[in-house]
Image (cartoon, rainbow, N blue to C red):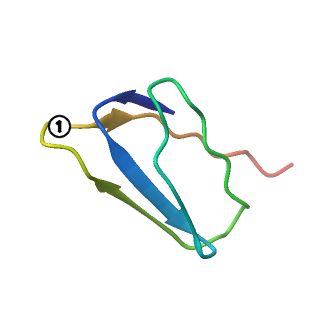
Amino acid sequence: MLVEGNIEITFQGTTVRPNLGEQVYKPAGAMHTVRNVGSTNSRWYYRYRQKR
């Protein structure tokens, strides 16, 4: 979830630029990249689901 700045997330041939507060879900295990595409610092939160 993006909380500050501008980022671009790419996974499985899809690229998204989330808005502030928007959550992006990617499939477990999918290779991905996250990059800052703004002129200021970015801050975002991530979470991993625990295996049961």
Query: The disc labelled 1 sits on which kind of residue?
Result: Asn
The correct choice, above or below, for 40 with respect to 3 in the image is: below
Q: Position of residue 22 (x, y in %)?
A: 56, 30
Name, please, the residue furthest toward the right: 52
The correct choice, above or below, for 46 with respect to 22 in the image is: below
Taking the spot 72% from the left edge, 45% from the top edge, the residue there is 49
Tally the numbered discs: 1
Q: Would residue 3 be found to the left or right of residue 29 on screen? A: left
Nearer to me, 33 or 48? 33
Q: Position of residue 10 (x, y in %)?
A: 50, 65
Taking the spot 63% from the left edge, 74% from the top edge, the residue there is 12
Q: What residue does disc 1 label?
A: 41
Nearer to me, 30 or 22? 22
Q: Would residue 21 be found to the left or right of residue 25 on screen? A: left
Q: Residues within 10 Å of mark 1 (few under 14, many from 20)?
A: few
Nearer to me, 48 or 51? 48
Q: Position of residue 27 (x, y in %)?
A: 73, 61
The correct choice, above or below, for 23 with respect to 31 in the image is: above
Q: Would residue 30 be found to the left or right of residue 15 on screen? A: right
Quadrant of the image occupied by residue 44: top left
Name, please, the residue furthest toward the left: 39
For the residue labelled by badge 1, is the local secondary structure a helix, a strand or a loop? loop
Q: Position of residue 50 (x, y in %)?
A: 74, 46
Taking the spot 56% from the left edge, 73% from the top edge, the residue there is 31
Quadrant of the image occupied by residue 29: bottom right
